[in-house]
Amino acid sequence: MIADDPLVLMLEAIDRAQVTAGLAEKQAAEAAKAAAEAAGKARAGAGRIAALETATTALAGKVTGWRQQMLDAATARRRGRWWVVPGVAAGLVLYPLLATTLPYGGYLGALAVNGTVNRWQAGAALMKAARSGVWDLVVADWNLITDTPANAKAVAECQKLAGQFGTAQSCGITVPVP
C-alpha cells in the first residue's frame, strides 16, 4: 500500500531526479574538465605552432641571406675577371715590342713579330751575344766539317768505329788555309 501512495511515489521520483541530477552534474563536471584539458592542449599546440612558424621564418631568412651572399660572391668573382681577356690580348701585342728592347731579345722579337728570322738564326744570335768566344769556336768546328766533304766523311767513319769498339777513335781531317 505504501507503494501506491502518491506522496511516496512523489518522494521516490524526487530521489530519482536527484540521483539523475547528481549524475548529470558529475558528467557535466567531467565534460568541463575534458574541455579545459583540450583547451590547454590546444593553447600549447598553438604555442608550438607559433614557435615553429617563428623558427621557420628565421631559417628562411638565413637561407635567403646565405643565397644572397653566394650570389654576391659569384658576381664579385665575375667582376674581378673582366681584365683577363684584355690583359692577355695586350700581352700578346706588347711582348714582341718589349722583347726587342731587352738584351738578346731583338731576334726573338723579330721572330715573334714578322717571322722573317728563323729559330736557328735567333738561337745563334743569342749564343753569340752571350759568349762570343765560345760561339766562334762552334762556328769554326762546324765550318771545318761542313766545308770539306772529305772531313765530314772521315768524322762519320770515326763515329761509326767508336760505336763498334766502344772506345775513342782518332780521325784524320784536312784543315784548309784560312
Image: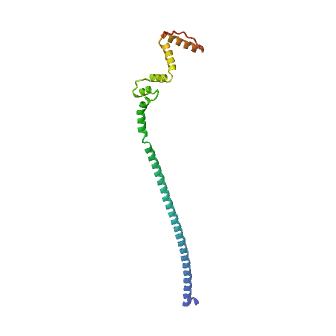
- Please name the residue shown 47% across and 51% down the image: 69
The answer to which of 71 and 96 lies nearer the viewer is 96
Specify the quadrant of the image occupied by residue 93: top left
Percent position (x, y) of residue 51?
Answer: 51, 63
Residue at position x 51%, y 19% in the image:
133
Task: Check the picture and name the quadrant holding the N terminus.
Answer: bottom right
Place of residue 149 in the rendered image (x, y in percent of width and height, measured from the top left): 48, 10
In the rendered image, the vertical position of residue 85 relative to residue 129, given as above or below = below
- Label total for image: 0
Tell me if residue 14 comes above or below residue 108 in the rendering: below
User: Residue at point 49% right, 58% down?
Assistant: 58
Q: Position of residue 165 (x, y in %)?
A: 60, 13
In the drawing, does residue 2 fall left or right of residue 143?
Answer: right
Q: Is residue 5 visible?
A: no
Q: Nearer the viewer, residue 127 or 160?
A: 127
Residue 27: x percent and y percent?
55, 76
Q: How is the image coloured?
A: rainbow
Residue closer to the observer: 155 or 166: 155
Taking the image as shown, residue 23 lies to the left or right of residue 81, namely right
Residue furthest out toward the left? 114
Q: Does residue 127 sit above or below 170 in this rendering?
A: below
Give the quarter of the image for residue 86: top left
For residue 62, say whether it is visible: yes
- The residue lying toward the viewer, choosing from 113 and 13, is 113
**73 with respect to 14 (left or right):** left
